[in-house]
């Protein structure tokens, strides 16, 4: 007797959080996040950072969105952490600062690991924490007037959530030292040369080029995109043979999703069904009976 196994329906998306310093635009399969503190170059206050983290976690748990666009309001992307706020002692003591940095690292890691494709659409200034956000995205499109860098060294502080770690993995140790130790502000073209950005476009074409990229990505096999993003991200942090293991397993998974899931020497017994049925003659229970006391003396 065969049993049909239908997966349970996916849970409905949770209610969208409400935001004060972040604009969240629902564009169907595309979610657009806009850092919205233009008067201070979209500096990442504690409140804005909290809202950005909430938005990213909301997107993590949504199936409907396939593309996430991150941008900034008022002709700039982001000036990084709000130094004015930091100067008031709002970050607390050393233990509290470490806790906050770990929260920001979680925020960037969650953004990087989204099973959607992320695009940073960057204009104007993109420094410090703003640059760290772009490094957690899959694609970065910049305008010709972008100025980017890691100026923390001149304020006597150090990056906390990607400016040294993620950057070194993207452009190497030597160039990461140059960017961080000198604190220069670089033109967009330099970011493309180093591999931090994908494209530089005129200011008037940023929205058009971002839309073109999103449209192309939506034409793709979405499961294929999810798998490719996963194995590239994980493989980059692993040794060659471990990374190739990810490739091999994903190739098998791809075959299964395309219909070639049946394997001759893999029986069709479903352990959870037989456990629930309490069938004493089932293959799973017979297997357990033979195994549970083997070589336990």
Image (cartoon, rainbow, N blue to C red):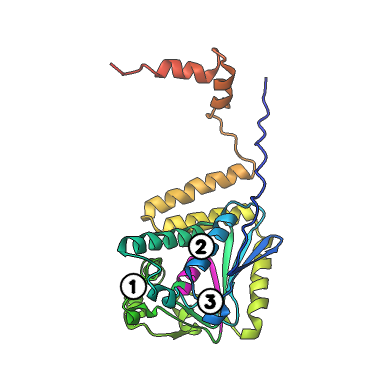
Task: Give the position of the C terminus as an image quadrant.
Answer: top left
Outermost residue, front side: 88
Closest to the camera, between mark 3 and mark 1, is 3
Residue stretch rendered in magenta on the structure? 130-143
- Within-10-Å neighbours for mark 2: few <14, some 14–19, many 20+: some
Contact (CB < 8 A) between labels 3 and 1?
no
The residue nearer to you, when weighing 247 against 118, is 118
Q: Quadrant of residue 211?
A: bottom right
Q: Which numbered disc covers residue 251?
A: none
Give me the C-alpha separation between circle 3 and circle 1.
20 Å
Q: Position of residue 181 (x, y in %)?
A: 31, 79
Q: Is residue 40 left or right of residue 65?
A: left
- Within-10-Å neighbours for mark 3: few <14, some 14–19, many 20+: many
Q: Position of residue 41 (x, y in %)?
A: 52, 80
Helix, strand or loop at label 2? It is helix
Query: Which residue shows up at 44% across the image and 15% down it?
Result: 289
Give me the C-alpha separation between circle 2 and circle 1.
21 Å
Closest to the camera, between mark 2 and mark 1, is 2
Query: Which residue shows up at 59% across the image and 57% down it?
Result: 59
Give me the C-alpha separation between circle 3 and circle 2.
14 Å
Query: Which residue shows up at 40% across the image and 73% down it?
Result: 86
Q: Which numbered disc covers residue 50?
A: 2
Q: Position of residue 197 (x, y in %)?
A: 50, 75
Residue 203 visible in image: yes
Sooner in the amino-acid sequence: mark 3 or mark 1: 3
Q: Is residue 139 magenta?
A: yes
The residue nearer to you, when weighing 48 against 206, is 48
Q: Is residue 266 left or right of residue 161?
A: right
**Residue, disc 3:** 42
């Amino acid at each position: 007797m065969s049993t049909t196994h239908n997966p349970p329906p996916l849970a409905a998306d949770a209610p969208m959080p409400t935001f004060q310093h972040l604009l969240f635009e629902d564009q169907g399969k595309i979610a657009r996040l806009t850092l919205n503190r233009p008067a201070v170059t979209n500096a990442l206050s504690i409140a804005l950072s909290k809202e950005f983290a909430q938005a990213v976690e909301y997107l993590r748990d949504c199936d409907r969105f396939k593309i996430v666009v991150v941008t900034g309001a008022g002709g700039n992307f982001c000036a990084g952490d709000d130094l004015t706020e930091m100067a008031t002692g709002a970050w607390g003591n050393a233990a509290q600062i470490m806790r906050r940095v770990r929260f920001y690292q979680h925020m960037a890691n969650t953004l990087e690991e989204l099973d959607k494709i992320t695009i940073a659409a960057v204009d104007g200034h993109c420094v410090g924490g703003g640059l760290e956000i772009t490094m957690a995205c899959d694609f970065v499109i910049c305008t010709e007037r972008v100025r980017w860098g890691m100026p923390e060294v001149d304020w006597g502080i150090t990056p906390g959530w990607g400016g040294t770690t993620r950057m070194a993995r993207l452009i190497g140790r030597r160039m990461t030292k140059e960017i961080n130790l000198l604190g220069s502000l670089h033109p967009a073209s330099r970011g493309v040369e180093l591999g931090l950005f994908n494209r530089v476009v005129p200011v008037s074409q940023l929205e058009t080029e971002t839309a073109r990229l999103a449209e192309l990505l939506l034409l793709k096999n979405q499961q294929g995109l999810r798998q490719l993003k996963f194995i590239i991200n994980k493989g980059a942090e692993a040794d060659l043979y471990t990374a190739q293991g990810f490739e091999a397993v994903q190739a098998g998974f791809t075959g299964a999703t395309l219909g070639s899931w049946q394997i001759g020497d893999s029986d069709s017994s479903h352990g959870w069904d037989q456990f629930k049925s309490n069938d004493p003659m089932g293959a799973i229970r017979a297997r357990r009976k033979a195994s549970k006391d083997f070589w336990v003396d």
